[in-house]
Image (tube, rainbow, N blue to C red):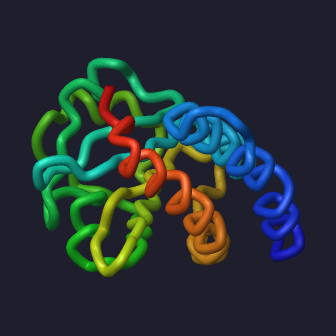
Amino acid sequence: MEEEINNFVMNELWNIVSSKDSSDKKLNLIVETISKFFGIDKCSLMVEKDGKFKIIASVGINRKVIDIAEVEAGKGIAGMAVKEKKAIFIRKVNIVGHQELWNEYKTDNFISYPIESNGKIIGVLNLTDKRDSRGFSERDVEAIAPIIERVRFVLEQCIGENKCFI
């Protein structure tokens, strides 16, 4: 698995990061590529704006969810990742609030990985609905770490250009 991750980061992700595309387009391509690599149906990238995190790039997420999804530090799975400043790996979830939106997910197996820059959490990468029946493992959480560095680099560009929220 380690060799696969290294090849993925050094080849596929590096090609996106080093492309001439705009940073917001790169982030969408990165989310799509991560989704394919991990074999997942749903993946999203959230960015902090005015103290809350909103989805700016996604695969498989219903537009209704994207429009209302807003996470504060400490609330929900992504919010817990922000507050703790570490990846959160959940196998079973007790759903509270907007229960109808959670019906969109086929598993209760999630990874939320915070993206830190200069001591501040600037984004969260969320992965769920793995296509195989095994779900995510601790190895998957570890495998995301080098990927996050590439995402952070492009996310910093997007924020610097003020193009994350168009």
Q: Residue at horizontal 63%, vertical 44%?
A: 30
Pick whichever, 125 or 120, lies toward us.
120
| Residue 9 vs residue 39, the one in the foreground | 9
- Residue 131, can we see it? no
Residue 66, image x, y percentages = 31, 28
The residue sitting at 46% across, 45% down in the picture is 107
Give the residue displayed 86% in from the left and 55% down from the top.
Answer: 11
- The image position of residue 112, as x and y in percent, is 41, 61
Left or right placement of residue 130 versus residue 120 in this view = right
Q: Nearer the viewer, residue 10 or 93?
A: 10
- Quarter assignment of residue 20: top right
Quarter of the image containing the N terminus? bottom right
Quarter of the view holding residue 148? bottom right
User: What residue do we see at 26% from left, 68% from top?
Assistant: 82
How many numbered marks, from 0 up? 0
Say above or below: 141 vs 45.
below
Q: Is residue 41 left or right of residue 91?
A: right
Residue 13 position, x and y percent, is 74, 52
Residue 24: percent from the left, percent from the top? Answer: 50, 35
The relative height of residue 99 versus residue 129 in the rendered view (above or below) is: above
Q: Is residue 150 visible?
A: yes
- Quadrant where the C terminus sits is top left
